[in-house]
Amino acid sequence: MEASLGIQMDEPMAFSPQRDRSQAEGSLKKNEQNFKLAGVKKDIEKLYEAVPQLGNVFKIKDKIGEGTFSSVYLATAQLQVGPEEKIALKHLIPTSHPVRIAAELQCLTVAGGQDNVMGVKYCFRKNDHVVIAMPYLEHESFLDILNSLSFQEVREYMFNLFKALKRIHQFGIVHRDVKPSNFLYNRRLKKYALVDFGLAQGTHDTKIELLKFVQSEAQQERCSQNKSHIITGNKIPLSGPVPKELDQQSTTKASVKRPYTNAQIQIKQGKDGKLMKQSKTVDVLSRKLATKKKAISAKVMNSGVMRKTASSCPTSLTCDCYATDKVCSICLSRRQQVAPRAGTPGFRAPEVLTKCPNQTTAIDMWSAGVIFLSLLSGRYPFYKASDDLTALAQIMTIRGSRETIQAAKTFGKSILCSKEVPAQDLRKLCERLRGMDSNTPKLTSDIQGPASHQPTVSEKTDHKASRLIQTPPGQYSGNSFKKGDSNSCGCCFDEYTTNLEGWNEVPDEAYDLLDKLLDLNPASRITAEEALLHPFFKDMSL
Ligand code: ADP
Ligand code: MG
């Protein structure tokens, strides 16, 4: 029946505009593919030329990832007697700082190779080209599998993520870019690997020697930036390289600053001259990021706690806009506060978004919480913001504005918010977004989660899953390729069948753990070690 239907469908339909269109689309796709293939081939040739010794060992097959700071290739090699091995070759952009490259490598060699942290096999260098060779882990595209994971798989995923985070945090490594494309997951083999230490920083007692230099380098850079950033009016000259505006899934290195192009952004330096105060006003509604009815504007500044410590700033200037939603000309002329902001906006913790200078491993736990939120709600990306204050306003819509303001005070930041938004019940939110809420027969646009208002998230019925919302595939703009590309396990899971097992009775422990991960206060946020012992994982062993 199906076959005959197929034949009928395949009958040529003369002058059918639809057929013409689909034919045109088909050939366009083919052209695009050929173009892409030719580009990849060229890149592979260039890599062989740049690092010729690679050719003695590897056959480079494909490009499997391309980020702002590196390209990753799949290669095969006959390293030992036996079958060919698959290897991932990470070619770092030649403009990367040598200390940065060495620190990334040291994280992999010292902390990697166990507990779900990617290890390293070799490293090659020719002039300024560095290639890190790692064991290849075939992995899924998070978006492709998000809505087909069983609840047990979600538990295992989070457990294994915490295992990796515990390991790196024990070494005093703050990853700073925890997100699905940096946590490789092979569903069939139940294998996991935390990758990409390109943005990592060390804690004060880090065991990774080179991270100490990365840190001090960042601090030095901050100093030099502070010296060179003389702000006149709204214009902020940038001393560093100015990259293209980066999207949700892209990352920004600590040393790379995004240009402040939005006219609404205003930079302030502190009241009484003692604080370096940065303040921006964000109209969340105008950015289509808040609820339809509510507009929130937020402004962040250092509070008195910070003022006491930031004593290096000039003390002569005073202003009268402190704790108001205006920015006076004195504040406009103040220097910008610089703190580590590397990472991906939607995964950044509140203390990162508010430029708190004292950041710890807790920032990775927040990011893990955002991943967990995606897994429980079936929405990815959950937060999608192009700038920090929009991201902060989005967090407020879930965790509450009063709670966010309160927490920020504990790390020396004062946030002004034009409207009060209540914290949401995490279970209700996730169930509504998943379409599992029995009180909500159809998911409507009244959900106050930011993702439900994202233009990239559509609402459609997934009959198989009986879920009402799905993020359409292909809208993910991350740096890992999608299903069907050579690095994903698309071949193993061509038809992702949704496993509803366990989803109808998500235990309270899940939301308790989520709540503890998305703790707005980094000092009380759950650690990876504690998370592994959380009752949510009661029958799982390390
Ligand atoms: P970047 O700094 O450019 O983000 P990553 O180290 O995150 O570089 O790698 C980019 C992508 O390459 C990853 O998201 C993943 O898809 C793929 N990748 C990286 N390392 C491996 C590996 N060891 N095995 C398989 N794929 C990998
Ligand atoms: Mg990455």
Image (cartoon, rainbow, N blue to C red):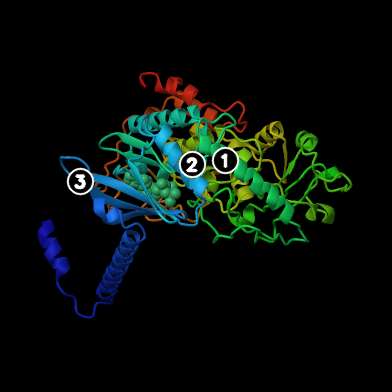
> Could you tell me which secondary element the residue under label 1 belongs to?
helix
Q: Which label number is shown at residue 62?
A: none
Nearer to me, 174 or 519: 174
C-alpha distance separating marks 2 and 1: 8 Å
In the rendered structure, the answer to whether residue 46 lies left or right of residue 403 reads left
Q: Residue at x 17, y 66 (%)?
A: 9
Going by the numbered disc 3, the residue's amino acid type is Gln
Residue 266 seen in render? no
> Could you tell me which secondary element the residue under label 2 belongs to?
helix
Residue 164 seen in render? yes
**Whole-percent x and y of residue 288?**
58, 55
C-alpha distance separating marks 1 and 3: 36 Å
Q: Residues within 10 Å of mark 1 (few under 14, many from 20)?
A: some
- Tell me which numbered mark, 2 or 1, is placed earlier along the sequence: 2
Going by the numbered disc 1, the residue's amino acid type is Phe
In the rendered structure, the answer to whether residue 239 lies left or right of residue 498 reads right
Q: Which label number is shown at residue 213?
A: 1
Q: Please determine whether, in this image, residue 390 is positioned above or below residue 414.
A: below
> Could you tell me which secondary element the residue under label 3 belongs to?
loop
Name the image quarter holding the C terminus.
Answer: top left
Nearer to me, 538 or 314: 314
Q: Residue at x 78, y 61 (%)?
A: 233
For label 2, the residue is 103
Going by the numbered disc 2, the residue's amino acid type is Ala
**Whole-percent x and y of residue 145?**
33, 43
Nearer to me, 56 or 313: 56
**Whole-percent x and y of residue 139?**
31, 43
Q: Which label number is shown at residue 78?
A: 3
Q: Quadrant of residue 329?
A: bottom right
In the rendered structure, the answer to whether residue 217 lies left or right of residue 452 reads right
Q: Residue at x 89, y 46 (%)?
A: 316
Cβ–Cβ under 8 Å for marks 2 and 1: yes
